[in-house]
Amino acid sequence: MAKGGSPPDGELVQLLTPEGERIESVTGSDGTVYRADFTDEEYRGLYRDLVIVRKLDAEATALQRQGELGIWASLLGQEAAQVGSGRALRPQDMAFPTYREHGVLYCRGIDPIMPLGLFRGVDQGGWDPNEFKFNMYTIVIGAQTLHATGYAMGVTMDGKTGTDEGEAVIAYFGDGATSQGDVNEAFIWAGVFNAPLVFFCQNNQYAISEPLERQTRIPLYRRAGGFGFPGIRVDGNDVLASYAVTRAALDHARLGQGPTLIEAYTYRMGAHTTNDDPTRYRIASEVEAWQAKDPIKRVRAFLEKEQIADAAFFAEVDEQAKRESLHLRERVLEMPDPSPLTLFDNVYPNGSPLVDAERERFGEYLASFEGSAH
Ligand SMILES: Cc1ncc(C[n+]2csc(CCOP(=O)(O)OP(=O)(O)O)c2C)c(N)n1
Ligand SMILES: [Mg+2]
């Protein structure tokens, strides 16, 4: 194990190198000490999570290619940022995702079939945000950062911060989202009202085809300084550092000490979505360079080197991942198409005369077809 140290300004907090060497601790510029001391069982658990979320993601991509999903936004390459931050959440913490947080969703204990209904176009996602403390996927870039800020301000008003048992909120967004007005407004409100909020930016280097250099002239984590709260950059391909940094920022928030911006420095290994062809705007050597930083390979190297896991364990994890992805596929194929009239459900909690009239008119239209069941 390497000795600890302090990262010079601009460097990443890293606790596990791409070669699988664990770093004892890293001290941030404000004196916060980041370390990840897991039991062998917990290290194996993190590896299991990473492998399973990657496999489920690959299955979803394949399902889209076979016409079973309308679109899919892959998390390939971002597993460590998502599993690390997702496992750092305590049960009482609330998360606000984008459309790519399948790994965080998995860590929150939501059945991975749930988002597939959304991407198949047969429902709105299906999980109860309050039950799982994980809001619905948000496609409008950056909008969820404002929702999270309002929610976090409410947590403070309810008196649920200030102790170890307090609540914290996390908002996920991408590098491109930092150019949105919504995100900058969220930074201002969260900063001014000292909201118990962690802004978790997965800098995967691209906003569809736009590279990071078109979003910012300074490292993203430094933006926080201008809004009056701390910012930190973590190696987003390192599950241990992603965990440690998120855990510290969440605890800072739950104690009532305000927001933090985390920039998880990572790379989108696949396409933006299945509608995109990244070979049109980035070169193969760039992708290859990031392959060497793969988030799963380094955990495996660490587990092998430290003899925390053996060949039988790795085979069993692969087997479980295969089983879960097959189960996912079977259930997607069985998802029923909804009745067209359900389109009008859940628009308002207590109904609306206008929507009711539209439903009736559409029902009559459907019934006008010969042999219609409607
Ligand atoms: C308000 C808004 N503008 C534009 C879009 C179209 N759009 C979808 S994804 C995306 C890029 C987002 O990039 P980033 O924030 O880096 O997240 P990533 O997809 O890389 O995870 C854009 C512009 C949108 N969904 N919402
Ligand atoms: Mg991006």
Image (tube, rainbow, N blue to C red):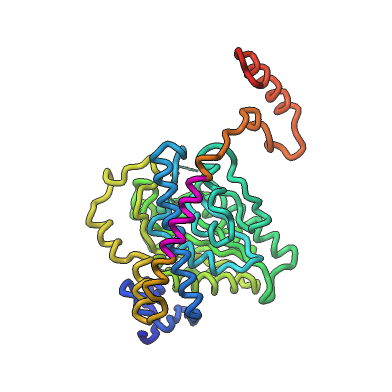
Spot occupied by residue 143 in the image (x, y as percentages of width and height): 55, 48
Q: Nearer the viewer, residue 45 or 101?
A: 45
Corner quadrant of residue 237: bottom left
Spot occupied by residue 229 in the image (x, y as percentages of width and height): 54, 68
Q: Which residues fall within the magenta stretch?
A: 317-330
Q: Residue at x 65, y 71 (%)?
A: 256
Q: Main secondary structure of the magenta part?
A: helix
Q: Is residue 200 visible?
A: yes
Q: Nearer the viewer, residue 253 or 166?
A: 166
Up/down of 87 relative to 217, above or below: below
Please give left or right for residue 195 compared with residue 13 in the image. right
Q: Residue at x 50, y 51 (%)?
A: 327
Q: Residue at x 43, y 43 (%)?
A: 63
- Could you tell me which quadrant the C terminus lies in? top right
Spot occupied by residue 23 in the image (x, y as percentages of width and height): 39, 81
- Could you tell me which quadrant the N terminus lies in? bottom left
Total labels: the figure holds 0
Up/down of 56 relative to 17, above or below: above
Please give left or right for residue 254 compared with residue 4 in the image. right
Please give left or right for residue 76 compared with residue 342 in the image. left
Please give left or right for residue 174 compared with residue 21 in the image. right
Q: Is residue 322 magenta?
A: yes
Corner quadrant of residue 163: bottom right
Q: Nearer the viewer, residue 130 or 341?
A: 341
Q: Is residue 194 visible?
A: no
Residue that lies at the very extreme toward the bottom in this rendered image: 3
Q: Is residue 347 magenta?
A: no
